[in-house]
Amino acid sequence: MTDTPLRTPTLLSLVAPVYDEELLIEEFVARAVAALADYDFELVLVDDGSSDRTPELLDRIAAADPRVRVIHLSRNFGHQAALTAGLEHAIGDVVAMIDADLQDPPELIPDMIAQWSQGSDVVYAVRQQREGETAFKLATASWFYKLFDKLAQVDLEPNSGDFRLLDRRALNALLAMTERSRFLRGMTVWIGFTQTAVSYQRDARHAGETKYTLRKMLRFSLDAIASFSHLPLQLATYVGILSAGVAFIAIPVVIGLRITDSYLPGFGSITIAILLLGGIQLIAIGVIGEYVGRIYDEVKHRPLYIVREELNHPSSSSRAAMVPATRAGLPARAPERVL
Ligand code: UDP
Ligand code: MG
């Protein structure tokens, strides 16, 4: 970017969810802090109920550096909830989210900020290559993005993860979406604003293993599709109309066969029809169940996450004076988007 920036960040928040990452958390913090050295920043690390040494490592890091804020959740609430916790606690006028496993390079953030300073409100990172992931994960991810693209009403860039940077205005819009089933990368597209992509190489995990089991991945995909599409529900209607249509056509055929006396007793075909329709009905009920379950979760309106402890809260540190300044004194907006 050679253009002169239209705005510069007052305070940058970098949010990362952390779950059982004792092997790499220190490395992550070191790289993130180094990458953001040119900015006034806060690093918001959300410990998603880790059961290894991660919490104590985080406490130690927070004690050594007041710019590192640590939020311990009371148990494991899942990646998207932990990320939301971090976004809600961040106070910066520019907020970036990143995975803590170093698959997303923190060194890309200055490039993302450069896009933001040119007037972009949402900058998302698109992975060019995905290193060190199993063929199974790559295949399922690619199916998922294709299916999501067909079903959902938002245009999600395939291969864009949760590595994104948002302007405060865009973040406030995102946080106004209070739904329980969260698919943050879809939600950041849904809010609109000016969106720009930055591409990067996705590295292999620095250490440790993926925290997404096949089950979690399946649940996550269902959440994503159910929160952005009603098509699975409508599909039952279409299949219903189709099979009812076939049945109606079959009535005169059967009568005709009866009259011409070429009617054959069709035990097999009847059984197949019953099983087929029964199966379709059960699937349709299952699909409805998926949505009803989510509606139930929404109406219970439970909190998305519970904070057990918070370290280096801005009002308790030397940054105290900056909090109202950051909130009130958001930088002057560029008059119009220039891209
Ligand atoms: N994570 C989390 N809670 C969870 C699972 C994962 O906070 O229940 C964090 C994890 O520590 C990492 C990020 O979310 O920083 C992405 O997880 P992971 O790398 O396991 O997912 P993948 O990259 O394999 O999709
Ligand atoms: Mg990962």
Image: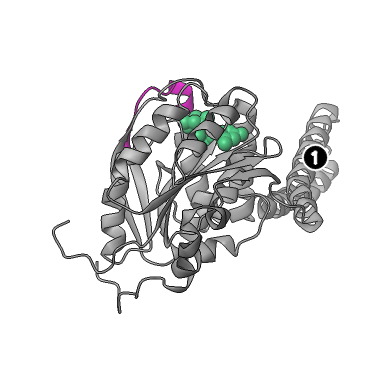
The answer to which quarter of the image holds residue 77 is top right
Residue 91 coordinates in the image, percent (x, y): 50, 59
Residue 22 appears in the rendering: yes
Q: What residue type is disc 1 on?
A: Leu
Q: Is residue 134 magenta?
A: yes
Residue 128 coordinates in the image, percent (x, y): 30, 37
Q: Is residue 192 magenta?
A: no
- Residue furthest left as drawn: 2
Label 1 residue SS: helix
Residue 294 coordinates in the image, percent (x, y): 74, 50
State whether residue 15 is above or below residue 172.
above
Q: Is 161 on the left or on the right of 331, as rendered?
A: right
Give the residues drawn in magenta, as a range. Answer: 127-138
Q: Is 18 on the left or on the right of 40, as rendered?
A: right
- Residue furthest bottom as drawn: 335
Image quarter (top left, top right, bottom left or bottom right) of the N terminus = bottom left
Image quarter (top left, top right, bottom left or bottom right) of the C terminus = bottom left
The answer to which quarter of the image holds residue 29 is top left
- For the point 42% across and 73% down, the residue is 329
- Front residue of this view, candidates 148 and 280: 148
- For the point 67% across and 53% down, the residue is 238
Judging by the rendered image, the residue that carries numbered circle 1 is 282
- For the point 53% across and 55% down, the residue is 314
Q: Classify mark 1: residues with Cα within 10 Å, few (<14), some (14-19) or many (20+).
A: few
